[in-house]
Image (cartoon, rainbow, N blue to C red):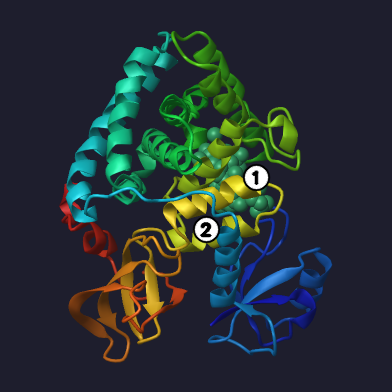
Amino acid sequence: MLKRIHVEQLRLGMYVNELCGSWMDHPFWRSAFLLDDPKDLQTLLSTGIKEVWIDTAKGLDVEGGETEAVISVVVEDTLAQADKFSNKEQRVNIVHEAARAVLICSKSKQAVTSMFQEARMGKALDAKDALPIVEEISTSVLRNPGALIGLARLKDKDDYTYMHSVAVCALMVSLARQLGLQDEQVRQAGLAGLLHDVGKMMIPLEILNKPGKLTDAEFELVKSHPAEGYKILQGGNGLSEIALDVCLHHHEKIEGNGYPDQLTDKEISLYAKMGAVCDVYDAITSNRPYKNGWEPAESIRKMAEWKGHFDVVIFQAFVKSIGIYPIGSLVKLESNRLGVIIEQTEKSLLTPVVKVFFSIKSNGRIVPEMLDLSKPACRDKIVSHEDPEKWGIRDLHELWSGLPSTNW
Ligand code: C2E
Ligand code: SIN
Ligand code: FE
């Protein structure tokens, strides 16, 4: 079981699963390790990190601490308080939408690829070329946001930027709707998502596709992409302030330590704040040239812990729109079975519809069964989210989308 504890509670023999807080600033690069060296313990205590996750299945346990389930409940409570948004729309079946979304994804990716490549050659970007893409992505998102968002997570390392643009467009549309914005604003938010990273076209490919960590000099260069993108969009036709603003400011953080302008909370616009959340979520859930993606539920949990980066209310609305356990997440149930999240339910983010397909007891597949955890008659519940790799599950996408993996 994963438990979050204070660093002072750490003892030799515990298995450190993750350090909370900054991933850049501490010397422990290995994300998970058995704490068996007193020197490591000393170093950990001196880093300024306040909390860590330990895995009590792999090392010593301790009294107290908060488990994942407790933390989900806390997130859930906060969200319930911020419950000004409702999700009353009729959604089409996920498998039905996935079949359409796979086509929309590949078409949109192609269109973005040629648009961005033309922009690199100096051709002016035109809203007239981009809006039909936004329109198609929006219609899929409105029918069922989980389908396209889930599929767009599957990226080739080489064309990451293009698919990332499609994904951020979809996430922006979904978030804008959740926030109750008007249709025209929803469209502008989507367009801004589609174009936010166009400045990456001006960064050398060897840097973007570098398999490892960037040097300081390389990262400085990458940090010019918002301003480069802004220049490209300024030279375009029919693009709104919203798209320009999101492009320039999607890497600002509310505490003022982002770039390029170190804006603080009040200085960052609603749309740029939305862009920051959608951008990071899609980045960390995707395989990139330099890093493999995390699972959706794991990513939500991590983002909730990154204080000072995101606007809290916007992040909450975002979680509300995609769920604490987004579609495609692998979860373990109290009944000792594994399932994949298929749909969010109206009732609570903790009670989605799950397709159960694996018995832990018999360590094997079972005939898939749909469970609506929000139904009073359903006694089962989620105890944790799980890493599919750990269980050797490679067909998770097939399980929720119904599409054979050869389709993408
Ligand atoms: P990206 O890969 O699309 O990531 C977008 C943003 O998501 C990052 O902006 C960061 O805020 C967040 N993010 C991504 N991965 C992580 C992570 O593992 N932990 C945390 N806490 N946040 C993460 P950032 O850092 O300003 O980077 C901007 C762009 O610079 C990245 O876009 C990527 O293209 C490039 N980049 C950053 N670090 C590396 C690296 O180590 N190697 C390579 N090849 N590129 C990198
Ligand atoms: C962090 O891990 O440093 C916070 C996340 C971020 O700001 O990128
Ligand atoms: Fe960016």
Question: Is 147 drawn above or below residue 45 in the view shown?
Answer: above
Query: Between 329 and 223, which is closer to the camera in this rendering?
Result: 329
Q: Can residue 75 be seen in this view?
A: yes
Q: Name the residue under label 2.
A: 300
Measuring from the top left, give residue 142's x and y in whole percent: 32, 41
Q: Can residue 114 be seen in this view?
A: no
> Disc 2, disc 1: CB below 8 Å?
no
Q: Is mark 1 on a helix, strand or loop?
A: loop
Measuring from the top left, give residue 210's x and y in whole percent: 49, 41
Query: Between 282 and 312, which is closer to the camera in this rendering?
Result: 312
Quarter of the image where one finds residue 336: bottom left
The residue that appears at 67% across and 46% down in the rendered structure is 309
**Amino acid on which disc 1 is placed:** Asp
- Mark 2: give few (<14), some (14-19) or many (20+) Cα within 10 Å: many
Question: CA separation, marks 2 and 1?
Answer: 14 Å
Instruction: Nearest to the eye among marks 2 and 1: give it.
Output: 1
Q: Name the residue under label 1.
A: 311
The residue that appears at 69% across and 86% down in the rendered structure is 64
**Amino acid on which disc 2 is placed:** Ile
Q: What element carries label 2?
A: helix
Query: Between 67 and 70, which is closer to the camera in this rendering?
Result: 70
Question: Is 86 drawn above or below residue 177 in the view shown?
Answer: below
Measuring from the top left, give residue 149's x and y in whole percent: 35, 46
Measuring from the top left, give residue 233's x and y in whole percent: 50, 15
Question: Is 46 drawn above or below residue 153 in the view shown?
Answer: below
Quarter of the image where one finds residue 11: bottom right
